[in-house]
Image (cartoon, coloured by chain):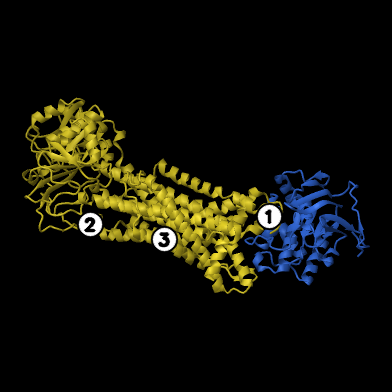
Amino acid sequence: MTRFGLRLTLRGGRESLIRLVVMALAVGVGVAMLLVTMATINALGKQNARGAWLATSPPAANGNPQLGQQGTSEASSSTIDPLWWLVSTNQLGNQVIVRVDVASAAARSLVPPGIPRLPGPGQFYASPALAKLLRSTPASELGDRFGGTEIGTIGSSALPSPSDLVVIIGQSARTLAQVPGAGEITSFTTSSSSGGPDSLGTTGLQVVLSILALVLLFPVLVFIGTATRLSAARREQRFAAIRLVGATLRQVAVISAVEALVAAVAGVAIGFGAFFLVEPALVHVPFAGQPLSAGDLSIGLLDILIVAIGVPAAATVVARAALRRVRISPLGVARRVTPRPPRFYRVLPLLAGIADLAFFVAVGRPTSSNGQIQAYLLGFFLIMIGLVTAGPWLTMAASKIMAKRTSRVPVLLAGRRLSDNPRGAFRAISGLILAIFITSVAVGVISTLLIDHGSTSSNTAASKTVTDQFVFGPNNSMPSVPTAELTSLRSIDGVTGVTLVYVAPSDLRTDGPVPDINGLGGDIQFGLASCAELAITPALGHCHSGAALATLGDDIAFMPVTKSVTIAASTTWPTAHISQGLKGLPVQLIAVATDGSASAIARAETALDRAFPFVGSPTLFGEIGTQTTQLLTALKTASEVVILASLLIAGCSLAVSMAAGLSERKRPFSLLRLTGVPLGVLRRVVALETAAPLIVIALASAVIGLVASDLFLRSQLGLTLRLPGVTYFVIVIGGLVGALAVIGSTLPLLNRITRLEDARME
Amino acid sequence: MSLTAAPVDIRSTDYLIEARDVVFDFGETPALRGANVSIREGEILAVMGPSGSGKSTLLHCLAGILAPKHGEIRFSGQRVDTLGDNERSALRRDSFGFVFQFGQLVPELTAEENVALPLLLGGLRRNDALGRAREWFERLGIDGLERRRSGELSGGQAQRVALARGLVANPKVLFADEPTGSLDSLTGELVMELLVTAARQAGTTVVLVTHEPRVAAYAGREVIVRDGLVSSLVPDTRAP
């Protein structure tokens, strides 16, 4: 029977061959998409693994003894001596430079990956991208921050992306031993899941990106499943003829499985071919905001085996299951087994999930981290289960209403078709619903955080002011700032003024309350500044007229969000009175106002870095959260990519299932056309029954995703959802239009299969 | 029934449908080779002939489903064969009704929705369309089946629903292609009785393609298609 099935599939005439080719092509497209998704996950994993060493932190850092060293490679720790180690970040414009300071603690110290030996004091290794930047940027704007001589480049095997800016600077052990946060390490972190502190901040990003890539698998797998069902109706008619001459149901099942298997195997071959064809071009796609290294985007032997065996096996199972849904009697495809209509209880998990999240808005979030994780995970998990289970019920309910009330034939026909088989209609887009939901939650939360963080671009003064906050100095401050350094800073070309914010002494008296601009409450360490200096750094706010000193509230140096910066600039700080002068007070922050040019800002940052090494990180005022903002933006971009891809894949699934549905209804459609029903009406029927679920489900899952993110933001962060930017809506609408275009491209098929010349013979 | 063949009179101008020298082929296979036929308003004409003779092709040409390669088709004096696809569709929708052998009902729709379909296509409101459709269920003895789907109807019931759909919009012509072909003789006769009665009551012209003399006997006049040519049978004494 297998041989017969093979002969029937391969030598069954032109129609049979066309069917095989179409199915193989559709499966091929699905397999190629699956391989791209798997390769992307692999690429992110490889990036992650290469950058893991940068997440290493000392087990007992200076001034930070609680830090643990988890998930690290302990190999050779007995034979290799420890290494003094400090990772920090530095900024040049909107680019983040990861700075690693190392010092040999003994003769045979550990050597970081990517370099042949440890740099000595006054030497450094730079990543290729940073080396290039160093060559094109004046030393006063960048190179002077690192001091010493560049002695080589860091190998690509130690860099997540070729565009990463990383520097490994040699120091003396004595120097690092004095620096808060530095400590001795005996091994490097080797995996992102170690749970250790993440200096780069990309570990979490890559984990989330991997999850987003996994989300793409749902619509891809649904598409492959749908593709294998293509032409099922025609196949079933042929099976009826075979039954008539005495074939048993079991034999028919074998033939069906063989046909599906042949198409799937051909599809897998096409898919692999297509993947290897587009792979070189895909390397340049910055999925995570960073280009991939050559070779990152690859698939392993296990991936190949999973796809090469899994897809044909799944296709066979799908074909078998599909055959069970119809009764093929010798007299033809008997009446289809009408599935029981979905019941209302399918909506309950969805409602329970939303209720769970709403409950914590009402009563407040759980106090423990574990409690919060459990509460929110349960809510989101219930919603995801609920979306999948409720989908067919919602499809049925909406289509019944549609069909019962309409006087328009296309709506009536489409509505009845959908309400007749809501599971079938929903199946093609079931992968989409989860992808859109998850990405909408991500985009909703990220957009709100980004808007909450604000942007310095809206505050001209802040975007021209560089601040250095001495968080790693004794008591989060510097005992004093030498006058020579101040003079040097003021003399930089493009610098317009320098302001020092002192730690307020205990005898501080303030006229009136100090504004709590961060809204953080808690321990407030007031700052103190001279009004003469504040006048030249308007980003920090200003004094009442005639005042000599001002009390700066809310620990202005610790502004975690840029929103506060905007408020700071328009704040009038209350007048301060102290018994002595400012001289001798420790300094918590130094602010350098510039003319706003990139070179002046870079020169100020470089000068501050050189003057006050290891005690702070000079950055544009309010851009303390730049790195977080960049990570969030990368996540948002990735989420939007997933939304777009999911919609297009869903469009392909729907187009395939539409083509299959048309074959099933060739006869009634053809006869309707014979009786004078215009082709336009039939087109609208097909478009409606295909596009309506896509649009409704995509919008519903996006709205539910945004509602869920709002509930999460309210209870967990006390924020209200801010609608995502135009990009999100453009991508959702653009994706829908793209999906509809894919569906529309198959509409000529309707014209073809209902051609009057052919239809009259139906 | 007399089987004396006689040339078809095509000189008269008061025919509702006229076919003149109609030629149609399927590639190398000729189907009609200069067929002529004229049908008066209100007439019930049976088109008979053996399998492959071209009788269904003739019906499809008369109904504007196929455009002949040569010759002309007129409906109410207006050329049909020169109309575009959209105009021919509109003509079929507005002026013609159809009953086929089987499978013409839309399976997802209820019986009453199937019947109401031409009215809805004509822009009638849903309730009005369904109301008019329901009237036909009683007339054709299928009341009570309005909410059933085609899969829940017997062959005879489905044909009566199809007949109701063919007549509900008061077409000028009803084209019936082997309307009893899939039915047993008893049910076939019932369907034909209903078809003829309803058509006569409404004054609808009927073009009935069949190969069964018993079915053709319901017609007022019979023509035979053989080798792509039409010849008429002299009508017996039955009333038109």
Q: Find the distance from the CA under tag 3 to the CA under tag 1.
A: 39 Å
Q: Residues within 10 Å of mark 2 (few under 14, many from 20)?
A: some
**Foreground of the two, A305 or A593:** A305
Residue A579, compared with residue A263, is above or below; it is: above
Q: Which residue is mark 3?
A: A308
Residue extending farthest to the right is: B237
**Foreground of the two, A25 or A606:** A25
Q: Which residue is mark 1?
A: A758
Chain under callout 1: A
Give the label on residue A194, or none.
Answer: 2
Residue A628, compared with residue B26, is above or below; it is: above
Same subunit, labels 2 and 3: the answer reads yes
Same subunit, labels 1 and 2: the answer reads yes
In the rendered image, is residue A759 in sight? yes
Q: x, y (%) of residue B110?
A: 65, 62
Secondary structure type for disc 1: helix
Nearer the observer: mark 3 or 1; the answer is 3
Q: Find the distance from the CA under tag 1 to the CA under tag 2.
A: 66 Å
Give the label on residue A208, or none.
Answer: none
Chain under callout 3: A
Figure chain in blue: B
Q: Count the numbered circles shown.
A: 3
Figure chain in yellow: A
Amino acid bearing label 2? Ser
Secondary structure type for disc 2: helix
Residue drawn at the location 29% of the way across and 59% of the way down: A373
Contact (Cβ within 8 Å) of mark 1 with mark 2: no
Q: Find the distance from the CA under tag 2 to the CA under tag 3.
A: 33 Å
Q: Residues within 10 Å of mark 3 (few under 14, many from 20)?
A: some
**Foreground of the two, B49 or A721:** B49
In the rendered image, is residue A355 in sight? no
Amino acid bearing label 3? Ala
